Image (cartoon, helix red, strand yellow):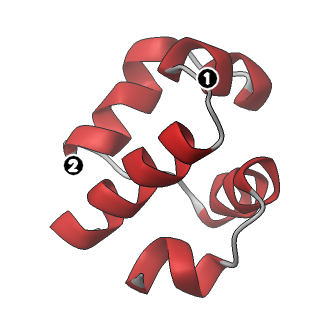
């Protein structure tokens, strides 16, 4: 994913008033895994992207393309 996705992910999390730890718990991943997505080190798979969009109540398009 590109830098825009990382920014959108972090922004959506903050808008939802959730911590990285809270989101990671909802996704059943370790906090460092989620943090790596926000920092652009790794990226979530499609299934996880769908879960993220539900948690943050945003479309996949908005999450990826902003």
Give SS at disc 1. helix
Q: Residue at x 71, y 52 (%)?
A: 56
Q: Residue at x 21, y 49 (%)?
A: 40
* Position in image of residue 63 (x %, y %): 52, 71
Q: Residue at x 73, y 22 (%)?
A: 28
* Position in image of residue 59 (x %, y %): 69, 78
Q: Quadrant of residue 23 in the image?
A: top right
Between 11 and 26, the residue placed more toward the observer is 11
Q: Quadrant of residue 37 in the image?
A: top left
Q: Quadrant of residue 18 in the image?
A: top right
- Crowd rating for badge 1 (residues with CA inside 10 Å; few <14, some 14–19, many 20+): some
The residue singled out by tag 1 in the image is: 24
For residue 40, the mark is 2
Between 15 and 43, the residue placed more toward the observer is 15
Between 39 and 16, the residue placed more toward the observer is 16
Q: Are marks 2 and 1 in contact (CB under 8 Å)?
A: no
Give SS at disc 2. loop
* Position in image of residue 42 (x %, y %): 29, 45
Residue 4 drawn above or below residue 52: below
Is residue 2 visible in the rendered structure shown here? no
């Amino acid at each position: 994913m590109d830098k825009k996705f990382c920014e959108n992910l972090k922004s959506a999390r903050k808008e939802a008033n959730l911590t990285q730890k809270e989101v990671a718990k909802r996704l059943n991943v370790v906090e460092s895994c989620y943090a790596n997505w926000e920092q652009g080190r790794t990226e979530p798979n499609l299934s996880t992207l769908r879960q993220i969009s539900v948690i943050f109540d945003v479309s996949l398009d908005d999450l990826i393309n902003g």
